[in-house]
Image: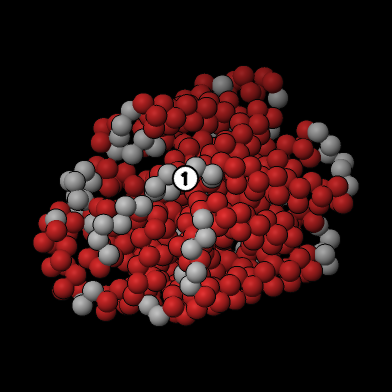
């Protein structure tokens, strides 16, 4: 066990717990538990909005799985990963003011609240909630595995022991603090990620004898590592371009990201968040994926890709500094996990229980149900994570694709096209989900692209045609 690295690492986690406890006390002074627990009272400023989006999006996939895949593929994966730079820009520009205004008018606390009021359909609510729960379990499992891998590498504990420690840490402060704790800790975690990744990249370059020496080493091992096409030449232009849909433009449909566009306090905050978020995401993603590529020249032969980032950090840095820097990926993982837990918990409690089981439930009962649901979900994901894969990035990307295929057109067209109706929304969601699962499971990169692209294109036309074809029916029923 590396005590020198563990002490600063644990200290930063302790600070995060203190922030969560503070947020919990602040929440008790407000009038609306639901609004505060799930949206932070819609009071986020520009900096915190940018950092909470960045920290939520920057997950175990970005900090553990991404560098691991870059280690295997080379600079081609860095090029692919940089499509994530536009994430915050697209989310806040596409949804932006209109989404915030409409969600306040609907008194929407969750994304499903918005869809429920926009389409007036319980079936849209059920399919939306089910999609969030199913696909986000995959995303949460990726975070649990990444957090456990990090603790395992740092402490020398077994994977199973590390998994239990991570689970306990997450559940305590998320269950207590809710969204306000998530937002405040995300601001701290996002700052740690920004600084930590920069320090790590510099240390790796120094340890490798400079960029020229690292490139020469990679060239001698496999020249394809320095090309846009990957170590095996399978990163084709069509495949790389499709990632601009999956982790760039399509991110607007991720519930854990889009809900952030409900929570800011002013237009000025929105504009500031767009600028800050774009810069921070760009720096973090470039740094982390370059670290993954450069690590291959310093530590060749790592078999489990998810261990690349913690192992290279411990290799190139003094132990005390490694502990601080390793808090960056742990911050990314924790911030994503807490957001996903809150989102799935809100789907169960707010979107299903309060809408269709007990609409007049007391505030105390809602509070107990929310905390209980969050805890139960965390334990379920714990058991899902007991047998991890070597690279968690594909778990996360599977969840991304499923959520985008389900939600992108009901959200975007629901905001900007008045003729869109519940029949179009439901048809597009079912079409997108079914086609995505079929493409992902049975078709390997159809037309050379990621499996999410064709389902998104087809579901767009389904939304349009079904909505137009049912205008008369909807008019008669109304």
Q: Position of residue 114 (x, y in %)?
A: 65, 43
Q: Position of residue 83 (x, y in %)?
A: 34, 55
Q: Quadrant of residue 126?
A: top right
Residue on which disc 1 sits: 388
Q: Position of residue 103 (x, y in %)?
A: 66, 50
Q: In front here: 263 or 362?
A: 362
Question: Can you see residue 369?
Answer: yes
Dot 1 lies on which element? loop
Q: Residues within 10 Å of mark 1 (few under 14, many from 20)?
A: some
Q: Position of residue 99 (x, y in %)?
A: 59, 51
Colouring scheme, one of rainbow, by chain, secondary structure, one colour: secondary structure
Question: Can you see residue 98?
Answer: no
Q: Quadrant of residue 290?
A: bottom left
Q: Quadrant of residue 18?
A: bottom right
* Residue 213 placement, left or right of 168: left
Residue displayed at 26% across by 57% down: 301
Residue displayed at 79% across by 69% down: 25
Q: With respect to residue 66, does 272 lie above or below?
A: below
Q: With respect to residue 33, does 51 lie above or below?
A: below
């Amino acid at each position: 066990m590396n005590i020198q690295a563990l002490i600063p690492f644990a200290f930063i986690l302790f600070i995060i717990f203190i922030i969560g406890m503070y947020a919990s006390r602040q929440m008790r002074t407000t009038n609306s538990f639901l609004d505060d627990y799930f949206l932070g009272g819609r009071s986020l400023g520009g900096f915190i909005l940018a950092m909470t989006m960045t920290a939520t999006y920057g997950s175990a996939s970005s900090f553990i799985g991404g560098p691991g895949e870059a280690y295997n593929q080379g600079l081609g994966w860095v090029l692919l990963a940089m499509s994530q730079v536009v994430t915050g820009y697209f989310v806040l520009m596409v949804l932006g003011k209109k989404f915030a205004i409409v969600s306040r008018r609907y008194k929407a606390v969750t994304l499903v609240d918005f869809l429920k009021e926009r389409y007036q359909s319980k079936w849209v609510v059920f399919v939306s909630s089910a999609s969030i729960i199913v696909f986000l379990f995959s995303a949460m499992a990726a975070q649990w595995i990444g957090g456990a891998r990090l603790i395992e590498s740092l402490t020398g504990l077994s994977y199973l022991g590390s998994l239990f420690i991570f689970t306990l840490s997450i559940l305590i402060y998320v269950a207590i603090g809710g969204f306000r704790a998530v937002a405040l800790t995300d601001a701290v975690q996002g700052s740690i990620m920004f600084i930590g990744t920069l320090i790590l990249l510099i240390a790796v370059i120094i340890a490798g004898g400079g960029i020229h020496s690292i490139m020469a080493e990679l060239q001698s091992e496999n020249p394809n590592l320095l090309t846009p096409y990957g170590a095996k030449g399978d990163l084709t232009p069509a495949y790389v371009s499709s990632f601009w849909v999956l982790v760039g433009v399509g991110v607007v449909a991720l519930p854990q990201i889009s809900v952030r566009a409900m929570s800011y306090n002013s237009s000025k905050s929105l504009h500031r968040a767009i600028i800050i978020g774009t810069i921070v995401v760009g720096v973090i993603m470039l740094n982390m994926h370059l670290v993954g590529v450069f690590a291959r020249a310093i530590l060749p032969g790592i078999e489990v890709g998810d261990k690349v980032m913690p192992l290279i950090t411990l290799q190139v840095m003094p132990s005390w500094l490694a502990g601080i820097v390793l808090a960056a990926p742990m911050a990314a993982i924790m911030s994503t996990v807490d957001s996903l837990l809150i989102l799935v918990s809100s789907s169960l409690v707010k979107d299903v229980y309060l809408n269709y089981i007990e609409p007049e439930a007391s505030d105390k009962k809602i509070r107990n149900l929310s905390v209980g649901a969050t805890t139960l979900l965390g334990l379920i994901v714990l058991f899902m994570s007991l047998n991890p894969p070597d690279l968690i990035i594909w778990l996360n990307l599977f969840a991304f694709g499923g959520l985008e295929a389900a939600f992108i057109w009901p959200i975007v067209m629901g905001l900007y096209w008045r003729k869109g109706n519940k029949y179009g929304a439901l048809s597009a969601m079912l079409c997108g989900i079914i086609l995505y699962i079929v493409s992902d499971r049975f078709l390997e990169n159809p037309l050379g692209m990621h499996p999410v692209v064709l389902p998104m294109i087809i579901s767009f036309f389904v939304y349009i045609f079904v909505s137009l074809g049912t205008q008369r029916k909807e008019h008669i029923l109304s």
